[in-house]
Image: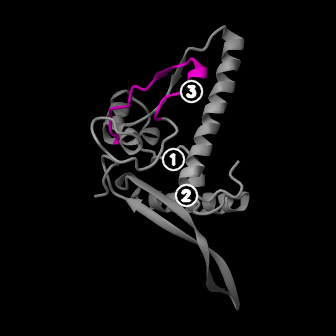
Amino acid sequence: LLKGVTDPEQKRKIIGGTFIDIFEVESKKITELHGRCDFLLQGTLYPDVIESISYKGPSATIKTHHNVGGLPARMKLKLIEPLRELFKDEVRELGMAMGIDEFSVWRHPFPGPGLAIRILGEVTAERVAILQHADDIMIQELRAADLYRHIGQAFVVLLPVKSVGVMGDGRTYENVAAVRCVETTDYMTAD
């Protein structure tokens, strides 16, 4: 689906459409097993809404979110979004009050479209594997340095360029990755 696609917004739309297709298939399976499927529960947060649509006054669309804007009418599912008007810090506070384990509550946000939007340029299996490995190393290092909970969101972006380097006695020409670590509480503004 993403072969040859480089535009991040186009990637988001393709992946969002795939989410809808999968929801549709799964809701049919549930209906076949249980006679009905009436609801879809989503973890939409207020920053998702603010970035995607004008919700409470004029604002620019920053990027689309697969979980904002409703479902196609053909799906006939009622959408439940209990966190839609909460910021991430409020959701974390609620999660802790409900007794949800700290590992889950403090997990860094991960984009709905996944790693595809953290790969600038075309998405390939090789580039996904490289990014997964780099991201894993960075998260492990944050945890080892006891910084994971102090950083609101950290991630690696695989850039569409390569750089010359030296390995042993030889010259290399390898991928370039950028690391971004952001301190924030509301997930709208970096501190």
* Quarter where residue 96 is shown: top left
Residue at the spot of label 2: 118
Q: Residue at x 72, y 13 (%)?
A: 32
**What percent of the width, then of the height, locates residue 116?**
60, 53
**Residue type pointed to by label 2:** Arg
The residue identified by callout 1 is: 111
Q: Residue 18, how many percent across, how many down?
A: 64, 38
Mark with earlier residue (1, 2): 1
Mark pair 3, 1: CA separation: 22 Å
Q: Are marks 1 and 2 in contact (CB under 8 Å)?
A: yes
Q: Seen in the image, is 95 located left or right of residue 17? A: left
Local crowd at mark 2 within 10 Å, few (<14), some, or many (≥20)? many
Q: Residue at x 60, y 21 (%)?
A: 75
What residue sits right under mark 3 in the picture? Answer: 72
Residue 142 picture quarter: bottom left
Residue in the picture at 39% in, 40% down: 53
Q: Earlier in the sequence, mark 3 or mark 1?
A: 3
Q: Residue at point 68% right, 83% down?
A: 172
